Image (cartoon, rainbow, N blue to C red):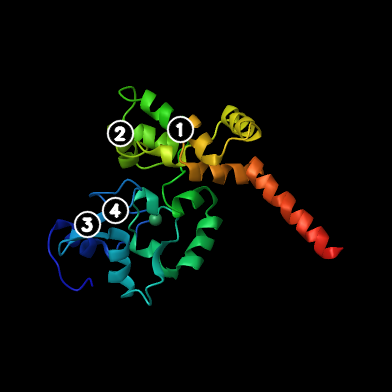
Amino acid sequence: MATKGNGKTYQWLLDHKDHDGDYCLIWPFYRNPNGYGQLGYLGEYHYAHRFMCDLVHGSAPSHDHEAAHSCGNGHMGCAHPKHLSWKTRSENLLDCREHGTQARSCNGNKGRLTDEQVMQIRALKGKKTQDEIAFTFGVSPPTIRDIFLGRSHAAPSKIKHWKPEEDEQLAKLLQDGLTHEEIAKVIGRPWKAVSGHAARLGLKSRRGSGGVLLNAVAGQSLRD
Ligand SMILES: [Zn+2]
């Protein structure tokens, strides 16, 4: 795809495709909330590191191939031509795991910052620069900016962590015989989140344990 184009972002890629510096080469233009560089090209957004990989190594061997970072710093906006190679998704994930601390970023931004960290970051607004905060928390400056603007993490509700007191409340309400739907209303979470979390905790609703009991009885009667 990277055979023609214009504009300063594309020119930057051309200018740096033989770059051979020691350190990560950070994309100086727009980076998405996950920290990855992006550029507009023929009316669509593309990842800068993918584009760079394409320029240096030719097109991806297959749809399943990703432009993998040997440095693990994709989330920091690295587009160093020598840090990039085509790898399948599973190869890339393996690498990410080896990078250790970067592992989560390889799986996307979700869950990288805890709700508590987001609160700490909000509290630092105006006291430290976005770059300083980003460095402190090991995320990209755009991530910090988005938190300040309330763009990302405005919906952490979707993956809102359960507090211990909520676990207790959930256990109690289940004991009281409430259904997951009823509990969902009481504690203000989607019922799917409630039943998912109950399952994770190994808690069964009365209806659930009844089912298990019936199965156990049925199993026994079969064995008898
Ligand atoms: Zn790098």
Residue at 63%, 33% (x, y): give it. 171
Q: State left or right for residue 15 relative to residue 202.
A: left
Q: Which label was assigned to residue 39?
A: 3
Mark 4 vs 3: CB contact within 8 A: yes
Three-letter amino acid code at the position of disc 3 = Leu
Say whether mark 3 is within 8 Å of ligand 1: no
Nearest the eye: 51 or 207: 207
Earlier residue among tags 2 and 4 = 4
The residue labelled by disc 1 is 188
Q: Quadrant of the N terminus?
A: bottom left
- Disc 4 on helix, strand or loop? loop
Q: Residue pushed farthest right?
A: 224
Mark 3 vs 2: CB contact within 8 A: no
The residue labelled by disc 2 is 150
- Disc 2 on helix, strand or loop? loop
Three-letter amino acid code at the position of disc 2 = Gly
- In the depicted structure, whether residue 57 falls above or below residue 166: below
Residue at 59%, 29% (x, y): give it. 169
Earlier residue among tags 3 and 2 = 3
Earlier residue among tags 2 and 1 = 2
- Disc 3 on helix, strand or loop? strand
Say whether mark 4 is within 8 Å of ligand 1: no
The residue labelled by disc 4 is 37
Three-letter amino acid code at the position of disc 1 = Gly
Q: Residues within 10 Å of mark 4 (few under 14, many from 20)?
A: many
The span from disc 4 to disc 3 (Cα, nearest Å) is: 7 Å
Q: State left or right for residue 192 relative to residue 2.
A: right
Query: Percent position (x, y) of residue 165?
Result: 59, 27
The span from disc 1 to disc 3 (Cα, nearest Å) is: 40 Å
Say whether mark 1 is within 8 Å of ligand 1: no
Three-letter amino acid code at the position of disc 4 = Gly
The span from disc 1 to disc 4 (Cα, nearest Å) is: 37 Å
